[in-house]
């Protein structure tokens, strides 16, 4: 159904792609994200499109495969999270205070945003160096350090029972030591 002389008329297929994506994910916002991801893949793989082929079928195939990849990614992430929770629950029960404290720390850790949790886990639990963890996550070291810093700040804020990241206290330099907070 391509009426354009351009065999790679992606724009002309947007309506069909959006309909198919909505059918797959049943959520308009997720459908738009899925179409976007599929179009990015299509543009990256433009050289694999055969000019005599159907652009619509080619794009639908890419959209479908993108959807399957997302489902697999989500299933794998859920499996990892469930396994981490199960492992945490298998720890031998400690004294009541320690057990409660460990549960609080675990809950606070699991409440971190995923990218912060991944970074902190690799460095603090798996004991990878910053460079190794950055390589695993395929991000610059500075980005990793920023994520770890935000994760630690958020954990400290949760520790204090605050929702916001705490602001460090100012210290008076010089003057009477009795005036220090």
Image: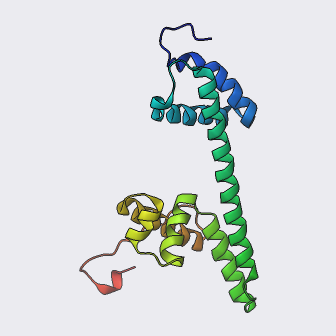
The quarter of the rendered structure image containing the N terminus is: top right
Q: Is residue 128 left or right of residue 101?
A: left
Query: In which quadrant of the rendered view does residue 66 lie?
Result: top right
Residue at 48% x, 79% y is 127
Q: Position of residue 180 (x, y in %)?
A: 35, 81
Foreground: 159 or 172?
159
Query: In which quadrant of the rendered view does residue 172 lie?
Result: bottom left
Residue extending farthest to the bottom is 95
Q: Position of residue 171 (x, y in %)?
A: 33, 75
Residue at 71% x, 77% y is 87
Foreground: 172 or 30?
30
Q: Is residue 173 left or right of residue 138?
A: left
Asked if 81 appears above or below 5 in the picture, the reply is below
Foreground: 113 or 144?
144
Asked if 55 appears above or below 29 in the picture, the reply is above
Q: Position of residue 177 (x, y in %)?
A: 31, 86
The quarter of the rendered structure image containing the C terminus is: bottom left
Q: Position of residue 101 (x, y in %)?
A: 67, 82
């Amino acid at each position: 159904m391509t009426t354009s002389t351009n065999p790679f008329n992606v724009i002309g297929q947007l309506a069909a792609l959006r309909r198919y994506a909505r059918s797959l994910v049943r959520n308009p916002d997720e459908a738009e994200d899925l179409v976007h991801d599929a179009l990015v893949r299509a543009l990256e793989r433009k050289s694999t499109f055969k000019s005599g082929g159907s652009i619509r079928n080619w794009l639908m195939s890419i959209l479908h495969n993108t959807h399957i990849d997302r489902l697999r990614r989500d299933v794998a992430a859920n499996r990892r999270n469930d396994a981490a929770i199960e492992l945490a629950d298998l720890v031998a029960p400690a004294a009541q205070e320690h057990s409660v404290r460990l549960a609080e720390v675990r809950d606070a850790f699991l409440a971190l945003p995923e990218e912060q949790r991944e970074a902190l886990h690799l460095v603090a639990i798996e004991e990878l160096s910053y460079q190794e963890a950055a390589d695993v996550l395929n991000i610059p070291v500075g980005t990793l350090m920023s994520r770890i810093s935000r994760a630690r700040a958020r954990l400290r804020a949760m520790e204090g029972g605050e929702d916001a990241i705490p602001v460090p206290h100012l210290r008076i330099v010089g003057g009477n030591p009795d005036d220090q907070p």
